[in-house]
Amino acid sequence: MRIKAFKHCLEEESLDCFVLSDVNSVYYLTGFLDIPDASNVLIVPLKDEPSLLVSSLSFKAASDSATECVVEEVQRGKKMEDAVIEKLSRANFKNVCFDTMTVPAYLKLSGELRRAKVTPRPELIWRLRRVKDDQELEHMRKAAQIADRGMEAAIQAVKPGVEEFRVAAEVEYAMRKMGSEGVAFDTIVVSGRKSAYPHGKCSAKRIKEGEFVVIDLGATHMGYRSDITRTVVAGRCDQRQAEIWNTVLEAHEAAFKTIRAGIKACEVDRSARTIIEGKGLGERFIHGVGHGVGLNIHEPPRLGLDSEDTLEEHNVVTDEPAVYIPELGGVRLEDTVVVLKGRGRRLTASPKTLS
Amino acid sequence: MRIKAFKHCLEEESLDCFVLSDVNSVYYLTGFLDIPDASNVLIVPLKDEPSLLVSSLSFKAASDSATECVVEEVQRGKKMEDAVIEKLSRANFKNVCFDTMTVPAYLKLSGELRRAKVTPRPELIWRLRRVKDDQELEHMRKAAQIADRGMEAAIQAVKPGVEEFRVAAEVEYAMRKMGSEGVAFDTIVVSGRKSAYPHGKCSAKRIKEGEFVVIDLGATHMGYRSDITRTVVAGRCDQRQAEIWNTVLEAHEAAFKTIRAGIKACEVDRSARTIIEGKGLGERFIHGVGHGVGLNIHEPPRLGLDSEDTLEEHNVVTDEPAVYIPELGGVRLEDTVVVLKGRGRRLTASPKTLS
């Protein structure tokens, strides 16, 4: 079914072949999910059955699980790019496009295939992948439920004196026990000044009384990811902290209320940014309000001021405004949200409380 | 120091500028480690100070930790590739090389920089990265110690009736509590027939009495990774299983004994393969005997039959022969080993027992 829909995209664009290397796109189209740095290649000719070229390492697993394609083993000692060139040379394609390729592989391929025009078109598969079907939404709901359990474990673990990585340990243990296939991305537990880094790493630093603690985590289920952030203060918070936190909450709610099929992504960003700018903190909100989530943790659509995306029904996106103040720390509140007609629906549902 | 050594490589190759996008290479050269899909770019001109171009998201963290370079913020709304082109256009470079780049970014860059030849040279940074210095080896020892603790937790958890992912939960919890920054790769716990997949995924499958269980795990410390595999039988094993397991152990030891600075990587593979072939199982050993490990889980040198690499002092490599039999399952035994003059030294040290 997905192969058929993808071939329809090729037809619309007058392409006669598409070459995919992204493991998540290969999984999306065939049902076979390999490790992230596998070098398999799916060749989708417009008029013929797709071929999945895999290394010996992956041949058995691919043969057992890939559907809608022929699985072919590339013998050891032979380079994947040479196998692809051989395969494509035998057909008489005019327009070969691809999602991603190393530059050396691209140079070799476009040099050898003289009759074909070889062009990167990474966005083409995203036309399909960005709109989730019912099965995908079910997987994402489950990934979100597991993340909520992880957040519950985090909130219980955060106390003055506890090391950041110890909180991450409790998060990941709780999620794994619920069957998470692993984290959706490196769990973030950052406290104090370091909470002002949007992508801080957890360390052996002990959480102190009165510090902001940003907890950003996600689970994976059937390859699909979830993404949630809560910010708390360990122990008692002061008035300034409460003001910032409430501003971010208000911005999060404002963005959430604008989410619906048909709205421009930049308008969702705008609605959150207006709240934060209104408190004189606009300069401290240094990223877009959100991003698509699915098999990738960051995928289209992008929800930022300069985004040209429009939200579609069954996109899944994050809503995560933030304020980062170097000397004080950061506050970010995030849910994973599915876009519906007329509204958004949260997939993550952990309560939002400051302390 | 590392920047100086890298500039020396550029000089040897008559290059006047190198552009790096790999986050681990940027960390190696500057000390700033970002999330895996960050889009920062380090520009290293032969005759000038390096510039690290980062997004607003990463600016504070990069400014606080990057050394030996000037950190520059790329304003939101501006594409990283355009910032790189602008920067490079101002200088009068003739030979610009790079590690990795998307094809669209490459096409744009080589189109705009008319006076410069733009060439992929991904192997250049590996001349340095593949040889670990004392500090790196110290980080890798720590990562290996944490992995040993993870393996201990796994062996304790493996029992008939236990789900695979539950074993992974115990592994990762034990490693996180020791300060691991997260897994080095998705933890593998695969049992029964699925253990015949070299890169199988753990699932809700319950381990059964008498099945092979392959446990492949790694920890991360200061960005450096470790890699260890043990195979056990849950409960009692039969004679056939013991024979296969002992063959793999013998192959592992044979490879280990050949490891030393100056030996060809293909000879290490050959020594393990000869043992396995001697038992008529050569066709079942479907990958090379090992790979380099460091900031990446798979990096040079490659230890396979067709590898042209030669091991150097302070390479860190895996020694992981295996036998995969579809109807029975797989056996793999792996340690992370540092290459010394005249011998190898194991960094991982968990006992090897079948049941």
Image (tube, coloured by chain):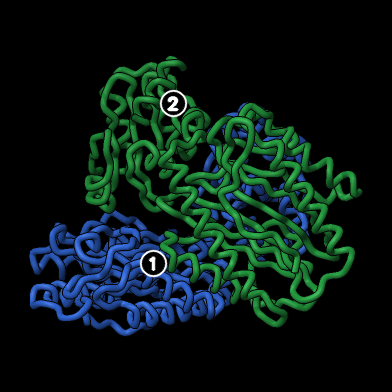
Chain colours: A blue, B green
Quarter of the image for residue A68 reads bottom right
Question: Which of pointers 2 and 1 indicates the residue nearer the eye?
Answer: 2
**Callout 1: helix, strand or loop?**
loop
Residue B28: where, in percent of width, then height?
A: 39, 39
> Left of A343 or right of it: where is A79?
right
Amino acid on which the number 1 mark rests in the picture: Leu
Q: Which mark is residue A311?
A: 1
Residue A157: where, in percent of width, then height?
A: 34, 79
Residue A105: where, in percent of width, then height?
A: 59, 34
**Callout 2: helix, strand or loop?**
strand
Please tell me which residue is depicted at 39% across the width and 73% down the height of the picture.
Answer: A336
Please tell me which residue is depicted at 37% across the width and 23% down the height of the picture.
Answer: B7
> How would you rate the neighbour count of disc 2 (Cα within 10 Å): few for under 14, some for 14-19, many for 20 or more?
many
Amino acid on which the number 2 mark rests in the picture: Cys
> Left of A178 or right of it: where is A237?
left
On screen, residue A32 above or below B191: above
On screen, residue B233 above or below A103: below
Tag 2 residue? B97
Determine the CA span between mark 2 and mark 1. Answer: 39 Å
